[in-house]
Structure formats: structure tokens, C-alpha cells
Amino acid sequence: MRRGAADHRRGAAHHPTAARDAIFGWTEVVVDPACSVEVTTDPGRLAIDLPWQPCAAQAVGCRELSLRGADRGSWIDLTGTHHRGEVFVAVSTSSGDRLRHAVGPRDAPPRVGIEGPRTEACSIAGIALGGDAAVVEVAFDIVDGSASRAFLQGTIGPDSAWTRPPAILRRQDHPEAIAESFATAGGRVYALDNGGPLRWFDRALGAWVEVDRRGGTSWVQGGVDMATYGDERPWILRDGQGRPLLDRSVDAIGIPAIDGDRVVWVEGRSADPAGGFGAVSLWTGSLGETGVLGAAELGPLRTRRLPAPRLGGGVVAVLDDDDRRTLAILRLGSGERRVFTTRGKEVIEQIVWVGSDEVAVQVGLAERSTTPSRVLRLAVESIPRDAR
């Protein structure tokens, strides 16, 4: 689930600046007569040399990446996902009026590379990962803040789908559409409007299909063969059919995390007037065709909110306080719990990826600051055990 490109605090990275350099081999994908992007035919040549350094406060089992760039106005954004024992990472780098997304296995050469302009007339935006696939958003035909949206989607690897005509959500056909978030699952593209309907693109029809909005929809996230979406209640969406994630009554459920046939989520009970809950706990279960099977509580959380956990390789990471400074890490197999706490005034801005051996988090200052954010890669075994 992505809301678009990173903000101004996310620094920069070093990458080739010649978007059409013939040594890489680029194929132009026309979004609109006045807008096009390029997909590389040789992504392995786009090696991104990120300057990871030992963490200043924890040299053992921790590496950090400062997101401050050498060039003014440039930045980097990282997002990752776990799929069948492997962590895939999208490295998004911006320099001047160009943005590049390079996607591949963690610490390995990219398998997909897409680059395009960042201008008022044509702007490549964010990227979302789901299973072994990704989707990239491009805004064009921008008038008075309203834009048409195009979505390029394909698997993370050699895939002709990246150069086929994109799925387009035209502002003239859907004037209310903002495409607040988007996702990919089962080879489909999903786009969610801000306060409006969730749609998926039917390539056979060449048209967008609206999903039943029972319970409301404020978020959507991708997966291997199904998407999850919802508001106060999460739903699963496979083959165009939506079903509740849980078949029992609960006061509130947060956004779930899915890895293979395992799902984790956070439940809240006894809502209070301030928007929090008297009791919050972490749950897990296996995912069947019709929803969760064998739901089991993993234990209480200290937070009074409903954070979205991340799951990968049997490891769960979830925010565990209302100040966004504490991260709980749990191994599903053994039940072993660990806890990471930020230092000073830094807060956890997002969980970037989770794998069986490592958790990556983005941290930064809570108040508005020119200090760039950092990504910390924490070896699970180096994180202190939870004393409680």
C-alpha cells in the first residue's frame, strides 16, 4: 500500500543520470502523447550502491543508511516485501526532474528498472509491492490539481507485462478519482480513491470494475493472489469476490499482514472517546479460501492504537507504544519476543521490510526538521529480548 513518492526529508542516493543511456537498453512506454516512461531491458546493470554503515549507537548487528544525498533536492525511498523466503526491495531514487525505481532481491542486482520524468505535465510517482510483483503509478494530464493516472504492473523479473499499455484511470471518466493508494495482487491492479470506491482493472474488458464497498474502504494492500482492503473491518479479495477476513465479532481490527498462508493482525477492545482502546492484542491464524482459520492470540501490546504489523519469514514486527518509539518483534514458531527502542527524539516512521533474519525500519525526528531520516537494518538476533 503506497500513497506516492517519498517526502522531502528522505534524502538521496547515487545512480546513473542518463535515463536513455544505450548501454542499459531502455524501452519507451507511452502513457499519453505527452507522457512516457522507460523500462530497462537490462536491469542487472542498474546496480545501486547504497552506502550502508555500522550503526553509531549499535555497531554489532545493525547497519544504517542516511537518506541525505549528495545532490540538493534529491532523495531516496526504500520499501520491501517478503515472498517465499526472499526479501524484495524497491529502491526509488530521484535526481533533478527524474525518478527511478529499481526492484530486486535484497542486496542483489535489480530485476526491474523503471524511470520517468517528475514534471507538472507527466510525473512518475510511487511503487507498491505485492508478493513477487510490483505496480508503478504515473500521473499525467494534470489540470487544476486533478490528474489522470496510469499503472504499470508486472512480476519482479523479466516480464513483458511491464511494456504493455498501462491501466489508465482518466480524470474525465472518473472526475472524483484521486487514487489515494494502489496495489497489485493476482496480476491485477487495484486503485482506491480518497473516500471513494475501490476498483480493479479488467484487462479483458479494458475497463475498471468497482468492488463492493460493504463496511467502507480506506486502505488496500496487495499480495500474491489476493488483495486485502477495508476500514474498520478487513476483507480479502480474490477473483473479484470480497469476503470478511474474520467471521467473528470484534470491536476493531487493524490492517493485517500476510505472508504465504500465515496472517497476523491487531485487535482492539473497549474503545474510548479519544479514539484508543482499553486493550490491544496481536493475533495470528492461517489463511484459507474463505478467511482466517485457527485464530490464536499471540499476546497483549502496550499501545492503545491499532498499528499495522509486518510479517516475513515467520517474524512479526509491530509498533508497541503510542509514541512510535518501540517496536515489538516476535517469532511465530518459538514465541520469542524482542523489543527495539529508538534513541533520543527519533520515532519509527515506517517498517520497511521484515525477514527471518532481519527487520528494517525507517526512523526520523518527530518534529519538522531538515535532518534526514535513516533506515536501520537490525539483525533479529541482535535485538534485545523483551524482559516482560
Image (cartoon, helix red, strand yellow):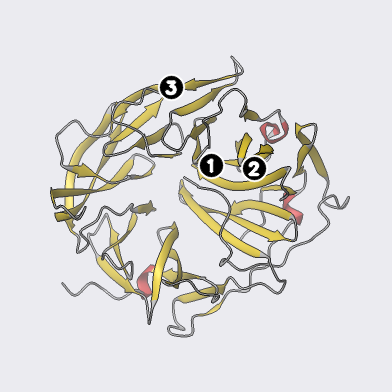
> Could you tell me if residue 358 is visible in this image?
no
Q: CA distance from mark 1 to mark 3?
A: 18 Å
Residue for badge 2? 157
Circle nearer the N terminus (2, 1): 1
The label on residue 239 is: 3
Q: What amino acid type should be assigned to the residue bearing mark 3?
A: Asp
Question: Which residue does the numbered mark 1 point to in the structure image?
Answer: 132
Instruction: Give me the residue at 30% from left, 26% from top.
Output: 214
Q: Secondary structure at mark 1?
A: loop
Q: Image quadrant of residue 165?
A: top right
As helix, strand or loop, the secondary structure at mark 3 comes to loop
Q: Earlier in the sequence, mark 1 or mark 3?
A: 1
Residue at the spot 41% in from the left edge and 71% down from the top edge: 366
Judge left or right: residue 365 versus residue 265: right
Foreground mark, 1 or 3?
A: 3
Q: Are marks 2 and 1 in contact (CB under 8 Å)?
A: yes
On screen, residue 337 above or below 208: below
